[in-house]
Image (cartoon, rainbow, N blue to C red):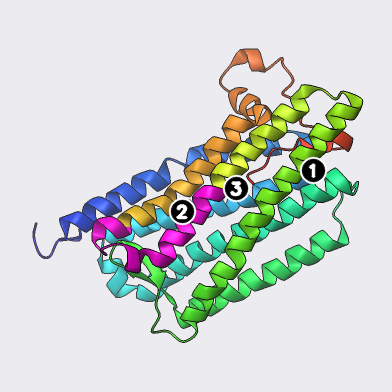
Amino acid sequence: MAQDSVFNSDKELLVIGIVYTILSAIVFPVYVLIIHALHSRHDLRENISYKLINLLNYCDVSQAFCHFLTGLFLIFPFFTVKIEFFVRIVGCTANTLWLATFVIIAILSCTRIGIAFFKTKPTKWTIWMIISLTIGGIYIFIVWVVGCITQNFQLAGPSWSYDIKVKYAGLFADLELVLCFPTLMLSFCSYILIIYSIYSKRRISRVSTSSLRTEVGILVQATILTTYMAILITLWHNAESWFKMTNFTLASLNCMWILFSHLNSILLIATNKGVRNELMKPFCKRYQSRHTSRLGPLSHVSSTMAVEKL
């Protein structure tokens, strides 16, 4: 390949960049359909849980866009030379969006607990929700602003990482672990409690088994995502001591990050009949006259039937 070519002269990085762009791009139409499905019904639009779900969806698709740009940076390496400041901002943005998912997941888990056990209204924002979102939003905004100003995130070969040479970068890396693992434990435990609540109410009042099946589906979804996220975080922060740092190793870790958005969308569709039906409406006439699964306003036992990411 000619030395003055705009394409990366390192064929390995060129191929990795192409893989990144393809993996990231294919998830865009899926999320467009999912977000449209959650916006298309009034009962879902007004439900707090589904509003939080869509925040997660927006974070996922935005991360995918950042990964798409990452692929372009590898394919056309002159970007990392001529506009390195922007390149680092893209990496910092992707990482901040990843952290934002944990904040939303934690609030989502607490919201479901409130609906299931404390009769929190599913369509009304409570003070603690607003305060939690405000504090979480401020923290995420600070992380993003500091990262953009200090340029503490770098594209090292085919993978993003904190630039430890930058002041306080190590501190922000440690804060990730403090935020992520407790959030994952909170999320998973909340679903176990909700399953117990549904099962207990079913034994007492003979509630339809569909409620229990729905919550079991949520638990399966939560288990898979929680496990995947925990493994990804563990590998990401211990890769240098556990593996030989080659382009393949770094690309594999970054692909795990990219595929997280795919896993989210697949599980959301697989475990949520209502979303599946909404997605099928534009493509299948028989769905036009059928009402989708009953995922309406959450109340009493049905209040725990909202299907979200975690």
Q: Is residue 291 shown above or below 249?
A: above
Q: Residue furthest left?
A: 2
Contact between marks 2 and 3 (CB within 8 A): the answer is no
- Residue 133 image position (x, y, % from top left): 74, 63
At mark 3, the secondary structure is: helix
Q: Is residue 164 shown above or below 222?
A: below
At mark 1, the secondary structure is: loop
Label 2 belongs to which residue? 65
- Residue 113 image position (x, y, % from top left): 80, 49
The N terminus, quarter of image:
bottom left
User: In terms of secondary structure, what is the magenta stretch mainly?
Assistant: helix
Quarter-of-image position of residue 254: bottom left
2 or 3: mark nearer the eye = 3
| Tag 2: amino acid | Phe
Label 3 belongs to which residue? 57
Name the N-terminal-most of marks 2 and 3.
3
Of 293 and 110, the residue lying toward us: 110
| Region in magenta | 226-250
Of 283 and 105, the residue lying toward us: 105
At mark 2, the secondary structure is: helix
Tell me: 241 left or right of 97: left
Residue 24 visible in rendering: yes
Label 1 belongs to which residue? 47
| Tag 3: amino acid | Asn
